Amino acid sequence: MHFQGQQLISQSTYVSSRTLVTVTLAKVFSIWYGVNTTELEVFGLKLGEAFDQALPILIGFLALNHLLNWLGDLHAFQAWNSSSKMGGSSAIGYGGKPLQSQLEDAIERIGNIEERANGVFASIEKGKPFETGSHESRSMQKLVELSEEQIAFLSKLKTRLSRLTLHGHMYLWGWFCLMPFGMAGYAIYLSTPFS
């Protein structure tokens, strides 16, 4: 999944999650269905009872590996969503400017509206006539239209970003944190003698 043009979950986190979930599901299903894993052979190698007893430790190491990968993605996710985010130095848009996000573009447009408004207000303060159809009157009408457009755009953008952020949080926290760690905890719990 991509979020703000960046990969939300890294390849290493995908692999660590998949490995952790696969091993924990194998352990959980073997316990649920009473499969004797001490006689299990993998690539001609009999695993034996020692492997069955060491599997909770292996699940713990896989969970630690996944935690480290996931924390790296979490920190990257938080950095992408900071207000101090800078554009890439090699990404150049039209006119030699760095590429901007929609939000950064809207902020720049609001700055342009403010500059135009200051020009109109300066003309009014100098005592220039403000008649219908004058340059100042047309400028003021244009400012009102631009302001209304930006307000509508920002409200739509806020809604879209909140939905995407919710989806990103569900993906990051639910699917790649709670689910694998919950399954690992459950598999370790089932492996303990007092379960």
Image (spheres, helix red, strand yellow):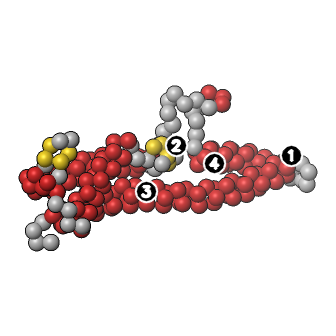
Nearer the observer: mark 1 or 2; the answer is 2
What crowding class fits label 2: few (fewer than 14 Cα within 10 Å), some (14-19), or many (20 or more)?
few
Question: For this rendering, which residue is in front, 43 or 97?
Answer: 43
Q: Position of residue 144 (x, y in %)?
A: 76, 55
Mark nearer the N terminus (2 vs 3): 2
What crowding class fits label 1: few (fewer than 14 Cα within 10 Å), some (14-19), or many (20 or more)?
few
- Pointer 2 with pointer 4, Cβ within 8 A: no
The residue under label 1 is which amino acid type?
Answer: His
Question: For this rendering, which residue is in front, 176 or 125?
Answer: 176
- Residue at the spot of label 1: 135
The residue under label 3 is which amino acid type?
Answer: Tyr
The Cα–Cα distance between marks 1 and 2, rounded to whole angstroms, is 42 Å
Nearer the observer: mark 4 or 1; the answer is 4
The Cα–Cα distance between marks 4 and 3, rounded to whole angstroms, is 28 Å
- Residue at the spot of label 3: 171
Q: Position of residue 126 (x, y in %)?
A: 78, 47
With 191 as the anchor, is 110 left or right in this view? right
Q: What residue do we see at 52% from left, 43% from top?
A: 5
Which disc, if any, is residue 106? 4
Residue 34 falls in image quadrant: bottom left
Label 1 sits on a secondary structure element that is helix
Label 4 sits on a secondary structure element that is helix
The residue under label 4 is which amino acid type?
Answer: Ala
Which disc, if any, is residue 16? none
The residue under label 2 is which amino acid type?
Answer: Gly
Mark nearer the N terminus (4 vs 1): 4
Which disc, if any, is residue 5? 2
Mark nearer the N terminus (1 vs 2): 2
Q: What residue do we see at 31% from left, 58% from top?
A: 180
Label 3 sits on a secondary structure element that is helix
The Cα–Cα distance between marks 3 and 1, rounded to whole angstroms, is 53 Å
List the single residue furthest toward the bottom: 194
